[in-house]
Amino acid sequence: MAKRAAPEVNAGSMADIAFLLLIFFLVTTTIETDSGLNRKLPPMEESDEDVIIKEKNIFQLEVNRKNQLFLKTGGEEKVIEIKELRAAAVTFLDNGGGAGDNACQFCQGKKNPRSSDNFDKAIISLQNDRATEYDTYIAVQNEIIAAYNELRNREFKRAFPSLDMNFIEAENAYSDARTTPATKAKLKEKLEQIKILVPQKFSEAEPKSN
Amino acid sequence: MSKFKKKKGGEMPAVNTASLPDIVFMLLFFFMVATVMRQNTLMIENKLPQADQVEKLDKKSLVMYIYAGKPSTNYKSQYGSEARIQLNDKFADVKDIAAFIAAERAAKREEEVPFLTTALKVDSKANMGLVTDIKQELRKVNALKINYTTRKGNALEGLKK
């Protein structure tokens, strides 16, 4: 008997099946956000001794219940807008008003004697009300981190001109899986150096309850 | 001559759909690979604020998630409209956080515990009182590494909405 050819499978409905699966995955997919602002909380230790900080080294920010910003620094007190905050913070951190031991080697600011001494001494303090909205708080945090990053970028470029990258790019390269371990070790050392030069001294006071 | 005669009728030839399954499969594979199945069903509104100075959370397995926000419409009648905390799949109180962190820590290997990060996924309209309470609670249990999860975007633009 002659061999019969195998009947062809009808693949017409394959597209339908694939569409069904596709729609299922489309609906269930949530592109998860997995990035954000990293912060470190201060440990719970109760220290009795108060640290004495000169008033000129504090950049005191207060956010009230109406999400307005009040800034006290360098002998000035004023209400500011969030969009002015980054520039104000950079001016404060970069001031370099210290003399002698406290002189700031790399600051490029105005050297106002009533504002911060150097990167290491400058402290940004933030206090918010319990009724402050979270997105205002995040915007303030974001601007402060941006101010620090701006200075770190500048200092990184100054210290390591041969690398031709700024602090953020270096950090990204450091966390990139494609970077070789040898390069990573070198980068880490440089990043640490800049982090020590421009430390993030950022303190949060406990909020006022109305 | 009839050989060269045009075929009868101006019928359009049918579009060949043989490659359609291939195209659909390609899309399917993309979504299958890109999909992350949500671990928790959200019972709250969770519109994250925007920020641009963000860092990526690299090790997904070493992250503990704390959600907070207003209960979504289904739960409003039961839980009110004030912002609340959600841990895993249920609403929780501030004092439950310590137990939650302890449970998460117990589920991880011991050498991983110091690297655990707490991601705070807080709705942008929540108030800071709640967030501060969470932070205080985290300090008490010594879970100091936190991450305010945000969407990428301009922080100042986000405020206006």
Image (tube, coloured by chain):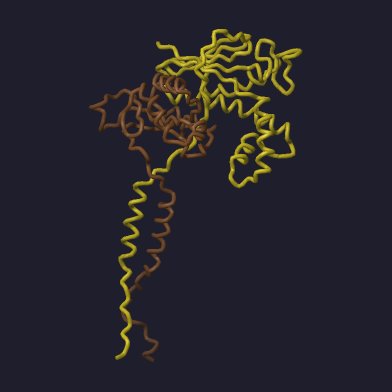
Left or right: residue A92 versus residue B46 is right
Q: Is residue A193 above or below residue A57?
A: below
Estimate the x, y position of residue A53 in percent, counting from the top left.
62, 10
Give the quarter of the figure containing the N terminus of chain A: bottom left
Camera-nearest residue between B3 and B154: B154
How far from the left and from the top, in percent, is residue B118? 46, 30
| Residue located at (33% from left, 35% from top) | B42
Q: How many marks?
A: 0
User: Within the image, what quadrant is residue A148 found in?
Assistant: top right
Q: Which residue lies at the image location 42% right of the left edge and 35% below the top edge?
A: B107
Query: Residue A188: which quarter of the image?
Result: top right
| Location of residue A49 (image quadrant) | top right
Residue that lies at the very extreme toward the left in this rendered image: B77
Camera-side residue of A100 and A144: A100
Whether residue B53 sits left or right of residue A32 in the image: it is right
Report the chain shown in brown: B
Residue B100 appears in the rendering? yes
